[in-house]
Image (cartoon, rainbow, N blue to C red):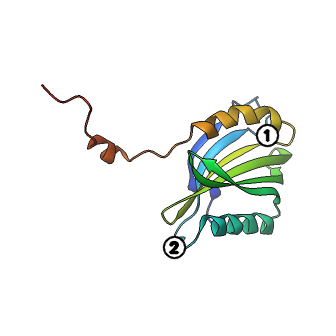
């Protein structure tokens, strides 16, 4: 099995509280699955939920939502994690989107105890999310100011 961090594109984590901090709240943008040809978003969400349940993760919600103004699925979950420095009950929310044949997830994670307090901060990241054109495409876009 591949290391899950290899799929992570962007990781935004809270500052560590020191040695005793065994879990950091985070927002992660990652690749959930590739090569999903002829798969709908609903099917991709069902596959993600199935994989999570198979891994022992409790899914508490799976609903249609929006991310960056585009159709998404929001999957909320809890998971008991055994980490090198201890154990923690985690809570998270994944916003799943398809782009081409790739499923991307924007994953908000915190402990069960800190999730509600962390959510307003994470929600700002979620609300600011948007897909933008690659740099090369943006460079070819005409400027509104013509050269003189």
User: In percent of the image, x 68 and y 63: which residue is there?
Assistant: 45
Q: Nearer the viewer, mark 2 or mark 1?
A: 2
In the image, residue 104 lies at what x, y percent? 58, 56
Left or right of residue 57: residue 3:
left
Q: Nearer the viewer, residue 63 or 120?
A: 63
Position of 140 with respect to 128 (left or right) is left
Question: Outermost residue, top direction?
Answer: 148
Location of residue 141 by image quarter: top left
Q: Residue at x 85, y 43 (%)?
A: 112
Q: Position of residue 9 (x, y in %)?
A: 54, 49
Q: Is 21 placed above or below 95 here?
A: above
Estimate the x, y position of residue 72 in percent, counting from the top left: 62, 54
Q: Residue at x 63, y 40 (%)?
A: 126
Q: Earlier in the sequence, mark 2 or mark 1?
A: 1
Q: Position of residue 82 (x, y in %)?
A: 83, 52
Residue 20 seen in the current view: no
Dot 2, crowdedness within 10 Å: few (<14), some or many (≥20)?
few
Q: Disc 1 marks which residue?
A: 22
- Counting other residues with Cα less than 10 Å from the Cα at mark 1, is it few (<14), some (14-19), or many (20 or more)? some
């Amino acid at each position: 099995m591949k290391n899950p961090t290899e799929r992570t594109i962007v990781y935004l984590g809270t500052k560590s509280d020191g040695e005793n901090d065994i879990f950091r709240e985070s927002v992660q943008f990652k690749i959930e699955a590739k090569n999903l040809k002829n798969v709908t978003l609903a099917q991709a969400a069902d596959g993600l939920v199935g994989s999570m349940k198979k891994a022992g993760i409790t899914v508490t919600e799976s609903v249609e939502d929006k991310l960056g103004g585009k159709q998404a699925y929001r999957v909320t979950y809890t998971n008991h994690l055994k980490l090198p420095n201890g154990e923690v009950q985690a809570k998270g929310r994944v916003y799943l989107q398809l782009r081409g044949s790739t499923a991307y997830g924007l994953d908000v994670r915190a402990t069960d105890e800190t999730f509600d307090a962390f959510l307003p901060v994470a929600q700002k990241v979620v609300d600011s999310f948007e897909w933008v054109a690659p740099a090369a495409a943006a460079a070819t876009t005409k400027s509104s100011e013509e050269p003189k």
